[in-house]
Image (spheres, grey):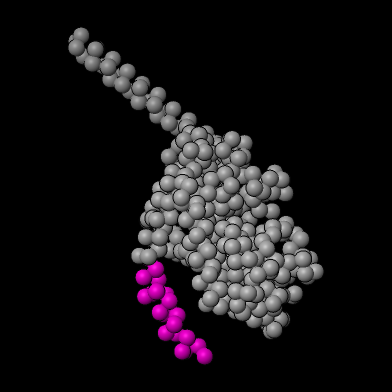
Amino acid sequence: MKFITKSLTTVAIAALAVSFSASTASAENARVYHWKLAMTWPTNLPPFSSTVYKFADDVKKMSNGQLIIRVDSKNKHKSPFGIFDMVRAGQYEMGHTASYYYKGKDPNTMFFTTMPFGMIAPEQWAWFYYGNGMKYMEKVYNKYNIMAFPGGATGNQMGGWFRKPINSLADLKGLKMRIPGLAGEVMAKLGVTVTNIAPGELYTSLERGNIDALEWVGPGMDIRMGFHEIAKYYYTGWHEPATSLTYFVNKRKWDKLPDHLKAILKDAMKANAFDMYVQNYDMSARAWKKMKEKYPQIQVKTFPKEVLKAMKKANDEVLAKYASKDPLFKEILQDQREYLKMVREWTKMSDFLYLKANMYNQE
Ligand code: CA
C-alpha cells in the first residue's frame, strides 16, 4: 500500500510537471510579438516597398496573427541609410535595405548585393542557399548583432543612360556620371568624374548637362524617372548583374523567437525575395515595350570591348586593394570566384546556349 501511495505521488508530480511545461510552452506559443521593420525605401517604390509590405502581411497570416510586423518607410523614419545602425541597436527589430550601402562600415557587406562582372541572380541564389553565401553573411554580420538574409533581387541592371555614345576609352575621360559603389570606384579609375546626386535631382541634372550619364536600375524602375525622355543611349550592364537586397534582423530579438516563428520568418523572406525578382522581371519587360514604342530613337548599346576589358582590369585592381587590407575580404572574394567559375559553366551550357540557339528563330 505504501509502495502504491508513493508511486501515485510520483506519477502525480510527474503529471503536474508535464502540465506545467505544457502551459509554459503554450504561453510562449500564444504570446503575440509586435515588431517594427525600417526600410530604406519610400512608401511607394515597387517592387522594393511592395514586396516588404507583402512580406509583413504573409508573416501575419502564416503565424495566425502571432507575429505582427509594422513596416516604416523612409518617409517615416527619415534615415534611409541608417537601417544597419537602427537594427543593430534594437531600435527596429528588422530592416530591409541593400547590404552594399554599408561598405563604409565594413567592405565585406558588398559581397551580398552584387559585384561588377560577378554572378547573375540565379547564380547568386545558388551561392547564398547552397554554396557558402549565407555562411559568410552570418560571419560578416553577427559581430554587429545582426542576422542577415537575402531580401529580393532586381536581376541584371542596365549600364545606364548616356547622352552621347561611348565608342572608346577616350570618351570616358572627363565624363560626369552618377554611379555609386564599387562600380563608381572602377569608373573613376578610367577617368570618369563620379558624382553622387540625390535621386530626386537626377532628371534635372541630366537634362541640364550637370551630368552626362547615370545608372539607375533597369526599364521597370527607370521608366518612372523619365531618363529615356532626355538620353537616347541605353547601355547594357556590367556593374550590377544581380543586386540582391537584404533583410536585417536584430540577433537578440531573433534568439527570443520560438522556433515556429523563426521558420515562418525565414520562409516568408525567401518567398518574397523570389517575388521581388519576378515582379521586377515583369515590370521591366512591360516598361521596355512602352519606352521603345514611344521613344523609338533609343538605342540599346553594349560598351566596346576595349572599354569592358579596361573596366574588368580596374575592377580587379580595386578588389585586390580591398583584399590586401582584410583577410576575410580575400577569403570571400576567393570563394565567390571559385563558385562563379563552376556555376557559370552550367549557365553557359543551359540558358546562354539555349538563348543563342533560339535567336535564329526570332528574327
Ligand atoms: Ca543601380
Residue 22 versus residue 247: which sits nearer the camera? 247
Q: Quadrant of residue 263?
A: top left
Q: Position of residue 339 (x, y in %)?
A: 38, 60
Q: Residue furthest top?
A: 2
Determine the residue positioned at 56% across, 70% down.
Answer: 237
Q: Position of residue 227 (x, y in %)?
A: 71, 71
Q: Position of residue 20 (x, y in %)?
A: 40, 24
- Is 152 within the magenta? no
Q: Position of residue 103 (x, y in %)?
A: 56, 49
Determine the residue positioned at 56% across, 38% down.
Answer: 88
- Is 354 within the magenta? yes
**Quarter of the figure with the N terminus:** top left
Residue 234 versus residue 328: which sits nearer the camera? 328
Q: Is residue 268 visible?
A: no
- State which region is magenta: 343-363
Q: Quadrant of residue 344?
A: bottom left
Residue 84 higher or lower than 119, as above or below: above
Magenta stretch prevailing secondary structure: helix
Determine the residue positioned at 63% across, 74% down.
Answer: 170
Residue 29 higher or lower than 299, as above or below: above
Residue 178 versus residue 166: which sits nearer the camera? 166
Answer with left or right where residue 359 lies relative to residue 33.
Answer: left
Labels in figure, total: 0
Q: Is residue 201 visible?
A: yes
Answer with left or right where residue 302 lies relative to residue 208.
Answer: left
Determine the residue positioned at 43% across, 55% down.
Answer: 333
Answer with left or right where residue 71 lies relative to residue 18.
Answer: right
